[in-house]
Structures are given as structure tokens and as C-alpha cells.
Amino acid sequence: MKMIKLLIIEDEASLRETWNLMLSHYGFLAHTAANGSDGVKIIQEHPIEIIVTDLQMPIEDGYFVLEYLKSNNLNIKTRVCTGHTSADLQKYNIDKIILKPFDMLSEVKEIISIFNEDGAST
């Protein structure tokens, strides 16, 4: 069974931990970061297959992460969690915008289905 490597970038500790617990339960190897700067460091150090990032965070935000991915031509599946959608997001290669509030279990199941469709087994 292939372990999918995922990165969760979220400044709210309880939400970050809930994502981590749920995705780990389904066989994902979840890395976590509290801000965009730490998230980019993890991307540089680990082969990440999917990113779930908040947009508004202290230090460096989700836009910082999106700019890093774009400027380095990294084709990583990306999901952005936000309370407000923006036309600015259209210039990035985002697979899905997750509008808050959202049902986390549904989002986790959708992530699992993406990798099952790609031939990965979680």
C-alpha cells in the first residue's frame, strides 16, 4: 500500500490537529505547519503529493505557499480553505477551494477518492 504524503498548513491548532488525525487514520502521512513559511520548508524537505492550506495566517499566508508552488512549477494537488473566495486565486493551479465552514469528513473522503481514482491505495 502506497502512503500518500500530505501537508496541512493551518494556523488554528485544533483544526490542524483534526485534519492530521483524520487523514492519518485513513493512511495518509500528514505533515503539518502553522504558517506558510513553515509549510514551504516542509515542501522543500519532503515529497508532498497534496496540500491543504488555509489562506489567512500569520507570518506567511496561503498566498505565499501558492506563489512558491507557481514560481517553482510544482504540480502538487492543492486545496485552499478560506472564508472568502477571491479572483486572485484564479491565477494559481488550485484543485479546489473549500469554503468555510465545511464538513471535514466529506473533504477527507473526497481526498481519499482522488487518490483511489489515481490508482493509489490508502
Image (spheres, rainbow, N blue to C red):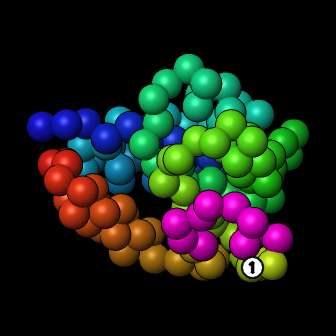
Q: Amino acid at mark 1?
A: Thr
Q: How many marks?
A: 1
Q: Which residues are the magenta region?
A: 88-97
Is residue 34 something that shows in the picture?
A: no
Residue position marked by numbered label 1 in the rendering: 85
Which residue appears at 63% of the width and 77% of the height? 100
Is residue 37 something that shows in the picture?
A: yes
Residue 22: horizontal and vertical position, in percent? 35, 53
Left or right, 4 with respect to 78, comes to: left
Residue 52: within the magenta? no
Image quadrant holding the N terminus, namely top left
Q: Is residue 114 above or below residue 10?
A: below
Which residue appears at 53% of the width and 47% of the height? 75
Q: Nearer the viewer, residue 3 or 21?
A: 3
Q: Is residue 43 above or below residue 116?
A: above
Residue 94: within the magenta? yes
